[in-house]
Image (cartoon, helix red, strand yellow):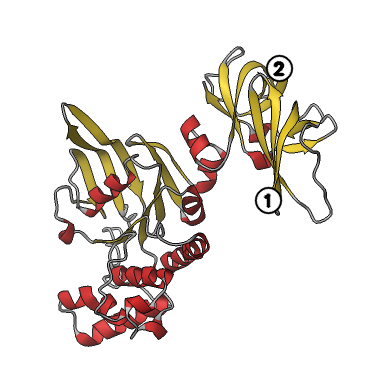
């Protein structure tokens, strides 16, 4: 197993070990550009703390500010305002080559005239590292990315996934405090990209250093991240673990961007024991647990509920769950699951994902009237 050497943290006079500084922190960071007579804020007041050894993702659509944020961490861009810290050290304005980070891009940028081992060793040779140390570290890194048997091959003799692993080994061999990855899997086909997601997480876990990953692919971010920041319009909409962001989206944007979610309009009609009853569509009732304190009877809001949390059947469910009747407008069989579109009236349509068990048949066909139900804990309120 490969390892990255680290410096032991200093101890206080009392002999206790203080908490390590965050690997990366951004404090009130802005990046502005002039566009004609207007000022455009590519990054608008971002505050982030990324811990040591964390796999952290910056997720969002094109133009949301995630790549600009990473480039400021790397030193390729200077913030217009704010502070960038690496390991507690203020590096705002410090040149990229004086920051203890390395970056991996979507384009592998391998030297075609060098073999794999020479590509990985390139940075070490520029630093005039001893030959024996170069050989040891290159061998270590190629074993880590499972390409030791390809050390003498040229990049053109490798697949896209193998080339990406060489680029990763070349970045890691310099033993950076953090590795920045800017959509590195975007050029790979779907199956290979999914395999590389697992590989990247394995490698990060083995070397134990901080990875910061930029992507617009929410599946990638959910698969690999310890935590992620969802960005939109230059700011952070939500920060949390994949489960927190998926199960409890903070805004309508996050609910819509992360996976598939049903956004349903409703009006609060009262609560019993902390469970709110919300009128939706044509008088149907949804139950919501844990609504914000600002919610009172008569409040207009949106509910978000994930398609896989909803049960579909022909019989009316009990009163302890949300119960909504509707008409199936579309069914799509996808092997492992069937997707249903259900019109519940009032201009609202709900998407339902139902797993296909080996002994089950589709619940109903298009045009059939069905009942939808879900637990109160699976309804999450978003104020309209």
Secondary structure beneath dot 1 equals loop
Q: Quadrant of residue 100?
A: bottom left
Q: Is the residue 340 above or below the residue 102 in the image?
A: above
Q: Residue at x 19, y 27 (%)?
A: 38
Tell me, yes or no, if residue 93 can be seen here: yes
Residue 228: x %, y % from top left: 43, 47
Q: Earlier in the sequence, mark 2 or mark 1?
A: 2
Secondary structure beneath dot 2 equals loop
Name the one closer to the observer, 26 or 60.
60
Name the one closer to the observer, 100 or 302.
302
Residue 195: x %, y % from top left: 51, 65
Q: What residue did someone put label 1 on?
A: 334
Name the one closer to the observer, 12 or 70.
70
Residue 62: x %, y % from top left: 36, 42
Residue 338: x %, y % from top left: 71, 46
Q: Residue at x 31, y 39 (%)?
A: 47
Q: What residue did someone put label 2 on?
A: 282
Q: Which mark is residue 30?
A: none
């Amino acid at each position: 197993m490969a390892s990255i050497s680290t410096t032991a943290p200093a101890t206080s006079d009392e002999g206790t070990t203080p908490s390590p500084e965050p690997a990366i922190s951004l404090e009130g960071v802005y990046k502005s550009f002039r566009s004609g007579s207007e000022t455009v804020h590519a990054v608008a007041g971002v505050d982030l703390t990324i811990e040591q050894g964390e796999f952290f993702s910056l997720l969002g659509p094109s133009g949301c500010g995630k790549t600009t944020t990473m480039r400021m961490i790397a030193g390729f861009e200077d913030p217009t305002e704010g502070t960038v810290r690496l390991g507690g050290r203020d590096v705002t304005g410090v040149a990229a080559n004086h920051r203890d980070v390395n970056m991996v891009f979507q384009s592998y940028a391998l030297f075609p005239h060098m073999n794999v081992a020479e590509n990985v060793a390139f940075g070490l040779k520029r630093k005039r590292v001893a030959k024996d140390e170069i050989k040891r570290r290159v061998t270590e890194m190629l074993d880590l990315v499972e390409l030791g048997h390809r050390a003498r091959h040229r990049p053109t003799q490798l697949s896209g996934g193998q080339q990406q692993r060489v680029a990763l080994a070349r970045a890691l061999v310099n033993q950076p405090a953090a590795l920045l990855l800017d959509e590195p899997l975007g050029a790979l086909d779907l199956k290979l990209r999914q395999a590389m997601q697992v590989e990247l997480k394995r490698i990060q876990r083995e070397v134990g250093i901080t990875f910061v990953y930029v992507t617009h692919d929410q599946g990638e971010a959910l698969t690999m991240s310890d935590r992620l920041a969802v960005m939109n319009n230059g700011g952070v909409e939500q920060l949390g673990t994949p489960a927190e962001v998926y199960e409890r989206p903070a805004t309508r944007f996050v609910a819509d961007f992360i996976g598939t979610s049903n956004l349903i309009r409703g009006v609060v009609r009262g609560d019993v024991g902390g469970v709110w009853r919300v009128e939706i569509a044509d008088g149907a009732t949804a139950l919501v647990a844990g609504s914000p304190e600002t919610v009172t009877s008569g409040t207009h809001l949106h509910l978000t509920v994930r398609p896989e949390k909803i049960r579909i059947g022909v019989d009316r469910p009990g009163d302890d769950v949300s119960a909504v009747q509707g008409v199936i407008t579309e069914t799509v069989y996808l092997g492992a699951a069937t997707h249903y579109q259900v019109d519940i009236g009032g201009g609202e349509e709900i998407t339902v994902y139902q797993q296909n068990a080996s002994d089950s048949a589709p619940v109903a066909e298009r045009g059939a009237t069905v009942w939808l139900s879900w637990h109160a804990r699976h309804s999450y309120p978003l104020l309209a």
